Amino acid sequence: MTDNTAAIIVHEHTRQFHLTNGRISYVFHADGQGKLINLYFGAAVPDREDFSYLTEVTHSPTTTCRIPGNLTYTLERMRQEFPEYGGGDYRRPALEVRQGNGSTLTDLTYAGGYRIIAGKPRLAGLPATYVEHDDEATTLEIELIDRPTGLTVILQYTIFRDQPVIARSVRITNGGGEPVSLERVMSLNLDLPDRNYTMTEFAGAWARERHPHTQPLHYGVQQIESLRNASGHFLNPCAVFARPATTESQGEAIGVAFEYSGNFDLHAEVDTFDVTRVQVGINDFGFSWRLAPGETFQSPEALLAFSAEGLTGLSHAFHRTVLEHIVRGPWKRRERPVLINNWEATYFDFNEDRLVDIARTARNAGIELFVLDDGWFGARNDDTAGLGDWRPNPRRLPNGLASLARRVNDLGMRFGLWFEPEAVNADSDLYRAHPDWAIRTPHRKPSHGRNEYLLNFADAAVVDNIFEQMSALLGSANISYIKWDMNRFVSEGYDLSRDAEHQGEAYHRYILGVYDLLERLLTAFPELIIEGCASGGGRFDMGMLFYTPQIWCSDDSDAIERLKIQYGTSMFYPLSTMGAHVSITPNHQTMRSAPLATRANVAAFGTFGYELDLGRLSDAELDEVHRQVAWFKRYREILHTGDFHRLIAPYGNEKAAWMVVSRDRHTAIVGDYRLLITPNGAFTRLALRGLDAGLTYKVDCTGASSIAGRSFTGAELMRIGLVDSDASCGQMDDVNPLGVTTDFSSRLFVLTAD
Ligand code: DGJ
């Protein structure tokens, strides 16, 4: 197999499929019973006609056997591609279909139907990876049939040419004469031959999203999920399965990421024979989907990646997949504007002149985009009213939006606007006109969150109305950007637009409605940048990134907390997706005061912006902001397209560090953060990564450093390390020669190859 080809090798004789691109191999076959059996997933291996020796059989007492007279063929011991329950496999199935007679039993078999497609077909109505040219990927669709029901299941696999990544999804068609109900459809099933893995999940809450937590796999099921109909703050729909000895730079790791924004289930089940079954899909809790004869259901897509170069290799695979195959439109390749957002500057206390003052000060500092956050619409004076009425609030903006947008544009800045399209306040004209558009269950009391209700986005009439309101507004003023917020999770879930037998579809249809509105807005306004947000990072997932190339990472804008949030987020998501702002001190979430430099030095590793009233800063601070913005603009292309390396984790350490290396490895930017001072501490060196060992790099530093201005080879910087001692001596009157004397201080090093 040559490198840089996404090949799918089919051996008709052995009914074997080998997906490979020179970096990974994924092999499965259809066995004599027509079952699809996984043979291998991992680092690339040379092809052979028959890998079936990797399926061993033996007689195991108490197992349930499929072939009369044969005691060795049992599905319980088979590593399957798309397992079902009821035929002797007692693990969690990938599919459950309730039929007219009440049974959920199916027996899918392969009868020789498959097709290979150059490139990657789109998934109707869903976010999915894509290619710009057909030679970037190859897709296999393989057909399984359940004869008694006439159900056809197409397993879809795409292997990318340049990445160790496979995209998986499932399409189900009811080819029988009776309706059936899909009760469980996993997008991806992967049976691994042993259990010697750790599982890392990315957990948290509002204001502390996506901290990594790692545990060894144990017997039984270990699961992460969401039942909020959003991916949520608590558990991100991604996980890493790594060998116990795997580090950032070495060892094997498998990553699974779900491109979906609603209820998910991602779990690993270790069975009695030490096989690990990994599954991800729509959470089956409360889910069912009625499939009438002739109808088709398309599952969301899941991504599977393999790295033999540690966690960093895995991150790079996902980052590049996001940058090349998920983020789309004109902003895929354009530099993202530095923005100022008025939320933490004013909250609800603003008028047109105050906003223009903030914008003007920001423009003077080099900031490119002014974003007007919550409070500009309807009768909104606080968070009890106005959601759903997407027209300017006459009390705050008596001259309308076009006037404000023009004044901001006249300063030479772009203008952006906040929406919460899925939400409605009871105190709104929309709710008064259409109370049945708010989600509630008949005869039950609806619960609110932040005084608001969610609109039933499963109902096309609701989505149409919000599209019409938003598009009228976007057409009425020069608006370049929208922030798409969502500040509560669903409760009393029900779809008032459909009858009882379709209620299991309500949550998924809601998410399809959200995707539909996003798609329609992008089609109507292709130049728009949409930044995702859900009370901060409550819906930070691969699905949203298909529509919103950047997502507000967290409502916690404290630099030290942000180190933890952005560090964890970086496992799957590239820096250009992470909304990160410099805010005021004391910080509004933690009351912590980190230096202005550190606030910028953390936000620079994201889509950089400011969220404070710059007019409250001193002249010296404004000069500093000016320099920060200029610095970021100079390096943003490298920061957003380069390779990110995590160096020192911020959890439980007194230091943290990370770096970005440009694709050509000629420039690197190191973020070096002191969390808490160690009195009379050790001299320290920071081992860098990803540089070219043979190049010589000149070191510049945004703060004080004993090595600034000197040059070192990449080999020295990676093997000996960058000298980054802060040498605090704990005596307040001493002048620290390195200038790093306070808690929460930081420096950025820029390394430039000669
Ligand atoms: C939650 C968001 O995360 C904040 O950034 C801000 O937009 C508020 N909502 C506004 O209500």
Image (cartoon, grey):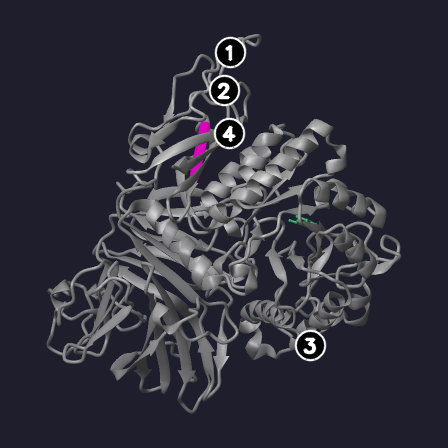
- Mark 4 or mark 1, earlier in chain: 1
Q: Which residue is mark 3?
A: 461
Q: Amino acid at mark 2?
A: Ile
Residue closest to the eye, 121 or 494: 121
For residue 25, the mark is: none
Position in image of residue 34 (x %, y %): 22, 79
Q: Which residues are magenta?
A: 655-659
Question: Image check: 99 left or right of 21?
Answer: right
Task: Say few, some or many: other residues with alpha carbon within 10 Å of mark 3 (under 14 / 14 to 19 / 20 or more).
Answer: few
Going 75% across and 60% down the picture, which residue do you hit?
387
- Quadrant showing the N terminus: bottom left
Q: Which residue is mark 4?
A: 747
The CA span between labels 4 and 2 is: 14 Å
- Mark 1 or mark 2, earlier in chain: 2
CB under 8 Å between callouts 3 and 2?
no
Q: Is mark 1 within 8 Å of ligand 1?
A: no
CB under 8 Å between callouts 1 and 2?
yes
Q: Amino acid at mark 4?
A: Arg
Q: Is residue 386 above or below residue 315?
A: below
The CA span between labels 1 and 2 is: 9 Å
Task: Say few, some or many: other residues with alpha carbon within 10 Å of mark 1 (under 14 / 14 to 19 / 20 or more).
Answer: some
Position in image of residue 209 (x %, y %): 53, 45
Q: Which residue is mark 2?
A: 677
Residue 97 shown in magenta: no
Depth check, mark 4 against mark 2: the one in front is 4
Q: Could you say which quadrant of the image residue 608 lies in?
A: top right
Q: Which residue is mark 1?
A: 730
Position in image of residue 335 (x %, y %): 55, 53
Q: Is mark 2 within 8 Å of ligand 1?
A: no
SS for callout 2? loop
